[in-house]
Image (cartoon, rainbow, N blue to C red):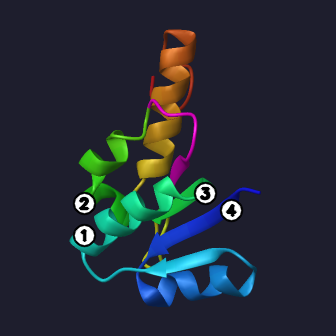
């Protein structure tokens, strides 16, 4: 059975642990990279990463973009959103449709 994991600062991931997700507290980007690589090899179908860490380890995240699993999804941390999740959705829709049909600023 597949699992769901959350990578972020220890304070932010505690709530996810309370609802049954596997939480991985990371203080540095090196720790986050190592954790991502380790759990990506395990049975994780979805890995949520706090946006601030996602931005710092984007090169490592990109290694998994073309793989079926795990799906690596940025989520806002306790300090709010950086807009990375919305940007990723916008890029995916643009690739699929061939044009920017979302959030058009005209």
Among numbered discs 3 and 2, the one appearing first in the sequence? 3
Asked if disc 2 and disc 4 are in contact, CB closer than 8 Å, the reply is no
Asked if disc 1 and disc 2 are in contact, CB closer than 8 Å, the reply is yes
Residue drawn at x 68%, y 62% as measured from the top left: 3
Among numbered discs 1 and 4, the one appearing first in the sequence? 4
- CA–CA distance in space, label 1 to label 4: 23 Å
Q: Is residue 68 left or right of residue 11?
A: right
Task: Determine whether the residue tagged by mark 2 lies in a helix, strand or loop.
Answer: helix
Residue 41: percent from left, percent from top:
48, 54
Q: In the image shown, does 45 or 74 lie closer to the viewer?
A: 45
- CA–CA distance in space, label 3 to label 4: 4 Å
Q: Is residue 57 above or below residue 69?
A: below
Q: Is residue 59 left or right of residue 9?
A: left
Q: In front: mark 1 or mark 2?
A: 1
Residue drawn at x 53%, y 36% as measured from the top left: 89
Please give the range of residues in magenta. Answer: 66-75
- Residue ranking furthest to the top: 98
Q: Quadrant of the C terminus?
A: top left
Residue assigned mark 2:
56
Task: Determine whether the residue tagged by mark 4 lies in a helix, strand or loop.
Answer: strand
Residue assigned mark 3:
44
Residue 72 on the magenta segment: yes
Among numbered discs 1 and 3, the one appearing first in the sequence? 1
Asked if disc 3 and disc 4 are in contact, CB closer than 8 Å, the reply is yes
- CA–CA distance in space, label 2 to label 4: 24 Å
Residue assigned mark 1:
29
Residue 31: percent from left, percent from top:
29, 74
Q: Residues within 10 Å of mark 4 (few under 14, many from 20)?
A: some
Q: Residues within 10 Å of mark 1 (few under 14, many from 20)?
A: some
């Amino acid at each position: 059975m597949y699992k769901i994991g959350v990578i972020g600062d220890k304070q932010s991931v505690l709530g996810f642990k309370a609802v049954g997700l596997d939480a991985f507290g990371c203080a540095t980007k090196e720790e986050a990279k190592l954790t991502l690589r380790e759990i990506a090899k395990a049975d994780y179908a979805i890995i949520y990463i706090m946006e601030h860490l996602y931005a710092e380890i984007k090169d490592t995240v990109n290694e998994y973009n073309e793989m079926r699993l795990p799906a690596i999804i940025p989520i806002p941390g306790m300090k709010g959103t950086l807009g990375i999740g919305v940007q990723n959705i916008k890029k995916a829709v643009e690739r699929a449709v061939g044009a920017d049909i979302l959030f058009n600023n005209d």
